[in-house]
Amino acid sequence: MLDSINSFLGTVDDLVWGIPLIVLILFTGLLLTIRLRGMQFAKIGLGFKLMFQNDKSGKKGEVSSFAALCTALSATIGTGNIVGVATAICAGGPGALFWMWLAALVGTATKYAECMLAVKYRTVAEDGHIIGGPFYYIEKGMGANWKWLAKIFSVFGVMVGLFGIGTFSQINGITSAVRGFFDPEITNTVSIFGMDYSWSVVISGIILTVCVALVLIGGLKRISSVAQVVVPFMAILYIVCGILILVLNITKIPDAFVQIFQGAFGLRAAAGGALGAMIIAMQKGIARGIFSNEAGIGSAPIAAAAAKVDEPVQQGLVSMLGTVIDTLIICTMTGLAIVITGAWQVDGLEGAAVTTFAFQNGLPFPAQFSAFILMVCLVFFAFTTILGWDYYSERCLEYLTNDNSKVVKTYRWIYILCVFIGPYMTVSAVWTIADIVNGLMAIPNLIALLALSGVVASETKAYFEKINEKNKAA
């Protein structure tokens, strides 16, 4: 029965993440890159400058630009960076990392555009809190006739929260890492749902569920306050470990890049299998890359809309840094560590165990200590992702229900319930379900970005012309 379900999910996943969606994602990012004249490269320095500047003239918004970015990063930096990269490389080979990079380079323009539009078309709810995101820039930007597309996006947004990035994959990644550290042989078990589970899985699942519930009750400001502390600290710790692995294995880096570029185009495959190998690497790399940085999915704009800025372009510049930090820095370090240490070729390893092997064999510390560092990073990354995606999916539900607070509060408890049962889902099924709903959520958002690309270009041009005039006057 389980094999049949996994087979069905695999078929649906291949259909959703087929060539059409991959082309749509890359084409959207490439079109925006051209229309914005490569702004993600030319203005990246300005983005970092604005990240720490609060716009004191901002009259709307609930949190600072930095807090909005951290909220978005809290949802993007998660198991995708540790587990997702590992599963992509194991399934598609080292070449999957190349397609992650490509998707991120053009995806940075996509992230800029969607977050800029979110601020431009955001609205204020009756109780004063800000609501914005793809559902509003579809309805207001494309017109009321496209409201059905906004509703489709919102439905998939709720599904991604409950069944995709938000709950199952994150809590499953956390408990798997905890079990791998405290009970790798699964010797201390308890029978649940007719199956044996490690006590470490059960206990960590309960503790995480309680912590999630305590934070979610506080709403956006509590989520963003937690994210501002946890995300920078854990990202820096993980990056330091990644740099250490690369420095200690610096002689192996050139060969790792050779493997990545050869694998990206199927050059290591047997005769006649190059195209198939390339397609698998492309599919897994782009799917996991989008899962990780969420460029084009339409999630980050929901957080960006709450930023205290008056200029949509400013928040777009800050928000696009999320893709740079998430994929081009953190995912790259994970991927290189896995390729350098050969962790992806070790039989019997999957998910977090692959990255754990890379850390244990790449860091100069005792294996248990290296595994502990990775476990801590994974736990906190995934924990903040759970928090961020509850906020995203609640905003989608608000749009669908016309801000029905009773429905939203009920949903919050259902979300917590999904966190509770997540540890008992199988790894393969969890990631396949996440891939499917992610792809379905991205489609309406990408359509909107293509339709509104002219608005993005003109708004951006007008902003920089205004800035240039101010500078000349000064």
Image (cartoon, grey):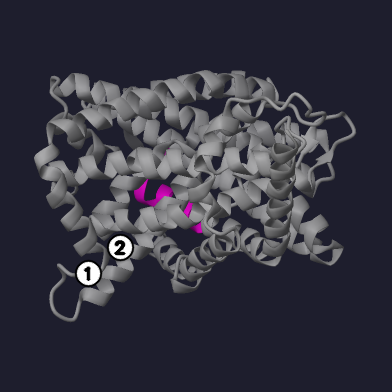
For the view shown, which residue lies furthest in the front direction?
473
Q: Residue at label 2?
A: 281
* Residue type highlighted by circle 1: Gly
Position of the C terminus by quadrant: top right
* Residue appearing at x 77%, y 39% in the figure: 131
Q: Residue at label 1?
A: 266
Task: Report whether residue 419 is seen.
Answer: no
Q: Looking at the picture, how far across and down is residue 147, in whole percent?
A: 80, 61
For the view shown, which residue lies furthest in the left direction?
251
Q: Looking at the picture, how far across and down is residue 415, in whole percent?
A: 61, 35
Is 206 above or below relative to 300? above
Q: Nearer the viewer, residue 73 or 368?
A: 73
Secondary structure found at label 1? loop
The alpha-carbon separation of the residues under discs 2 and 1 comes to 8 Å
Q: Looking at the picture, how far across and down is residue 291, in whole percent?
A: 46, 49
Q: Which residues are magenta?
A: 424-436
